[in-house]
Image (cartoon, helix red, strand yellow):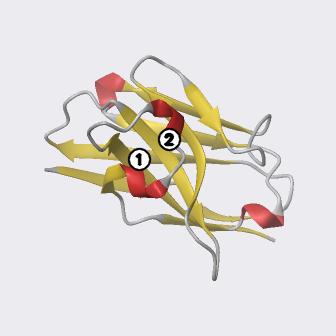
């Protein structure tokens, strides 16, 4: 089993930056794909950015040019650097890993495709 713990959230003014981290523990074999998702009040969980084992990335249109997903395999840690934050970026940010068997990277922005989730870290931009 894999445990994921997010950190780095907080309150920031518009235009500010935050760096989210997601540490993995347990059976931390190499993951086929990891990602960041966001859930605002009263909204569905949506994909923000994903990164697969081949280094391919996908970003939500709202995140392109502002957010960068990366990972440190030696530390079993996934990161999300968020710059030029906007109020609409507010929400709970979740880390996910391991696409379910048979799921292709093209579907990696769909929350239902992942096996493991963290508890989330709150980001508030105001």
**Residue at the right extreme?**
15
Question: Is 48 or 11 nearer to us in this picture?
Answer: 48
The correct choice, above or below, for 123 with respect to 67 in the image is below
Mark 2 highlights which residue?
107
Q: Earlier in the sequence, mark 1 or mark 2?
A: 1
The disc placed on residue 13 is none
- In three-dimensional space, the C-alpha distance between marks 1 and 2, rounded to whole angstroms, equals 21 Å
* Percent x, y of residue 74: 30, 23
Left or right, 64 with reference to 38: right
Under circle 1, the secondary element is: strand
Tell me where residue 64 sits by quadrant: top right
Q: Nearer the viewer, mark 1 or mark 2?
A: 2
Tell me what residue is drawn at x 13 percent, y 50 percent: 1
Tell me what residue is drawn at x 77 percent, y 44 percent: 61
Mark 1 highlights which residue?
22
Left or right, 106 with reference to 101: right
Label 1 Cα crowd, 10 Å radius (few <14 / some 14-19 / many 20+) = many
């Amino acid at each position: 089993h894999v445990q994921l713990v997010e950190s780095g959230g907080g309150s920031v003014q518009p235009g500010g930056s935050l760096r989210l981290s997601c540490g993995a523990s347990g059976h931390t074999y190499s993951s086929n794909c990891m990602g960041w998702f966001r859930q605002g009040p009263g909204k569905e969980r949506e994909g923000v950015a994903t990164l697969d084992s081949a280094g391919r990335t996908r970003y939500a249109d709202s995140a392109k040019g502002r957010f960068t997903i990366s990972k440190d395999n030696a530390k079993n840690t996934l990161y999300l650097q968020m710059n030029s934050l906007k109020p609409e970026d507010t929400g709970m940010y979740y880390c996910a890993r391991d696409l379910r068997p048979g799921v292709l990277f093209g579907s990696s922005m769909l929350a239902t495709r992942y096996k493991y989730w963290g508890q989330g870290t709150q980001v508030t931009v105001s």
